[in-house]
Image (cartoon, rainbow, N blue to C red):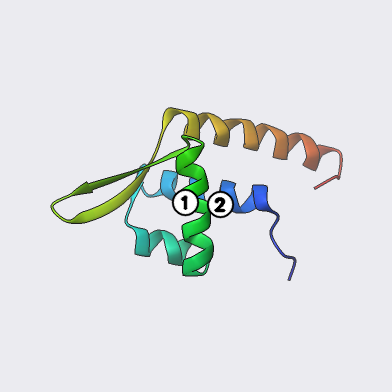
Amino acid sequence: MKKRERVEVIADILQVVQRAGGKIKPTHLLYKANLSHDALKRYVDELQKSDLLVETEKGGKRTYALTDKGHEYLAKYRQFKEFSDAFGVS
């Protein structure tokens, strides 16, 4: 099995959030993105600093949501992926 590149992991995390309706609980994100707790924390911190993901807390329940910039990142990532796949470079 091929190890995922950093950019693929980021896209996977954002896609998981998007598929969950734009909002997801941390535990669900952990399992669906197939990451360790430490790895998820590192990536989530990075995505928040880059303004791709935002953390909200309501009634003691934490969730992560995509920002507009996060949606834009995914759109650009998909375009790039289609382009690279078309040339057999993926």
Rendered location of residue 52, percent (x, y): 48, 37
Position of 61 with respect to 39 (left or right) is left
Given residues 48 and 64, the one toward you in this image is 48
SS of the residue at dot 2? helix
Q: Who is closer to the viewer here, 40 or 83?
A: 40
Q: Position of residue 13 (x, y in %)?
A: 51, 51
Of residues 14 and 56, the one nearer the viewer is: 56
Q: Residue at x 32, y 56 (%)?
A: 25
> Which residue is tagged 1?
44
Number of on-image labels:
2
Which label's residue is closer to the chain start, 1 or 2? 2
58 and 45: which is toward the camera? 45
What is the three-letter code of the residue carrying label 2? Asp
* Residue 41 horizontal/vertical position (percent): 46, 59
Q: CA distance from mark 1 to mark 2?
A: 12 Å
Q: Is residue 52 above or below residue 20?
A: above
Q: Left or right? Give the position of 58 relative to 19.
A: left
Image location (x, y in percent) of residue 8 = 65, 50
Q: Quadrant of residue 54?
A: top left
Residue type marked 1:
Val
Q: Quadrant of the N terminus?
A: bottom right
The residue wearing badge 2 is: 12
Residue mark closest to the camera, 1 vs 2: 1
Q: Residue at x 78, y 42 (%)?
A: 85
